[in-house]
Image: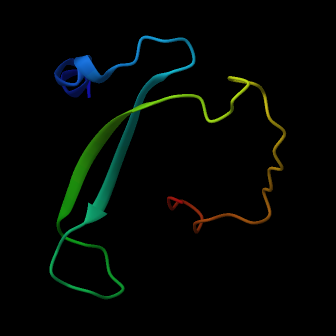
Amino acid sequence: MKELVKIDKKFIPTQRGQSLYLRPFTFGSSNFLGVQASPEYNFIIITSPVASYYAQGIQPIKILVSDEYVRAVRGGLG
């Protein structure tokens, strides 16, 4: 990731409230479609310059967090 940020240095915004978004992700890449763990995976990191989502800048927001409903099974990823 450090090497990727060096490569994309020219895309890092310099204004307050902006940043370089880093998104690492993994996906199974074998040629099998079904319910089983993939024997092959790709690990990819994408970068993108971003500005604040909100016109008033970075402000705390209220969220509702639930420990009863989750996006993934226990031990899994959402």
Identified at 58% across, 66% down, the residue is 72
Is residue 54 depicted above or below 72 in this figure? above
Q: Looking at the rendering, which quadrant does residue 75 occupy?
A: bottom right
Q: Looking at the rendering, which quadrant does residue 59 occupy?
A: top right
Is residue 71 depicted above or below 33 in this figure? above
Identified at 50% across, 21% down, the residue is 18
Query: Residue 27, position in %: x, y?
Result: 29, 62
Q: Nearer the viewer, residue 75 or 63?
A: 63
Query: Residue 78, position in %: x, y?
Result: 54, 60
Q: Looking at the rendering, which quadrant does residue 22 occupy?
A: top left
Q: How is the image coloured?
A: rainbow
Q: Nearer the viewer, residue 18 or 39?
A: 18
Q: Is residue 3 left or right of residue 62?
A: left
Q: Is residue 7 left or right of residue 67?
A: left
Q: Nearer the viewer, residue 18 or 78?
A: 18
Identified at 17% across, 66% down, the residue is 40
Query: Residue 7, position in %: x, y?
Result: 16, 23
